[in-house]
Image (cartoon, grey):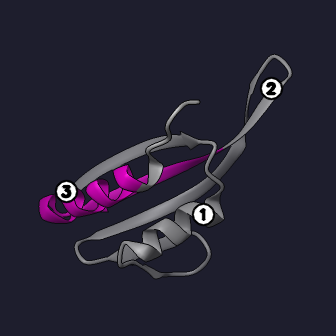
C-alpha cells in the first residue's frame, strides 16, 4: 500500500467528499471515503491565514494500492484543477 498526505486549500470538506464519491467511492462515516483499491481520511484544518486573508483548508490522507493510487489521483487532478483569471 502507498500513502500520500496533502493539505488542500480552497476546497471545503463536503465538496472533496463529493468529488471522491463521484470517483466511485463510498462514504464510511463523515470523514472517510473508500473506493476500489483506495481509502481517504479527510480532516478539517484551521483556516490558512495570510494577513487579513483567510482560506479554508483540509488534509487528505490517501492510502491505496499502486493501481488504486493512480486511478484516484487522476480523478482528483481533473476535479482540483483551477484556472486563473
Q: Is residue 72 left or right of residue 67?
A: right
In contact (CB < 8 Å): disc 2 and disc 1: no
Give the SS element for disc 1: helix
Which label's residue is closer to the chain start, 3 or 2? 2
Instruction: Identify which residue is drawn at 80% across, 26% down.
Output: 53
Give the SS element for disc 2: strand
Q: Is residue 37 left or right of residue 50?
A: left
In contact (CB < 8 Å): disc 3 and disc 1: no
In the figure, 33 relative to 77: above or below? below
Q: Residue lying at the far top in this picture: please name it.
A: 51
Residue behind mark 1: 15
Residue behind mark 3: 70
How crowded pointer 2 is (Cα within 10 Å; few <14, some 14-19, many 20+) is rated as: few
In the figure, 23 relative to 15: above or below? below
Q: Is residue 38 magenta?
A: no
Residue nearest the viewer, comparing 25 with 65: 25
Question: In x, y percent, where is residue 49?
Answer: 75, 26
Q: Kindly tell me whether residue 10 is visible in this rendering.
A: yes
Q: Separation of disc 3 and disc 1 at Cα?
A: 21 Å
Q: Kindly tell me whether residue 1 is visible in this rendering.
A: no
Residue behind mark 2: 53
Residue bounds of the magenta highlight: 57-78
Q: Residue lying at the far right in this picture: please name it.
A: 52
Question: In x, y percent, where is residue 12?
Answer: 66, 55
Dividing the picture into quadrants, the one containing residue 85 is top right
Dividing the picture into quadrants, the one containing residue 51 is top right
Which label's residue is closer to the chain start, 2 or 1? 1
Amino acid at each position: 500500500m502507498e500513502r500520500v498526505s496533502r493539505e488542500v486549500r480552497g476546497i471545503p470538506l463536503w465538496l472533496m467528499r463529493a468529488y471522491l464519491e463521484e470517483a466511485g467511492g463510498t462514504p464510511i462515516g463523515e470523514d472517510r471515503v473508500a473506493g476500489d483499491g483506495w481509502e481517504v481520511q479527510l480532516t478539517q484544518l484551521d483556516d490558512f491565514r495570510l494577513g487579513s486573508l483567510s482560506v479554508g483548508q483540509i488534509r487528505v490522507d490517501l492510502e491505496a494500492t499502486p493501481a488504486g493510487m493512480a486511478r484516484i489521483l487522476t480523478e482528483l487532478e481533473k476535479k482540483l484543477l483551477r484556472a486563473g483569471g
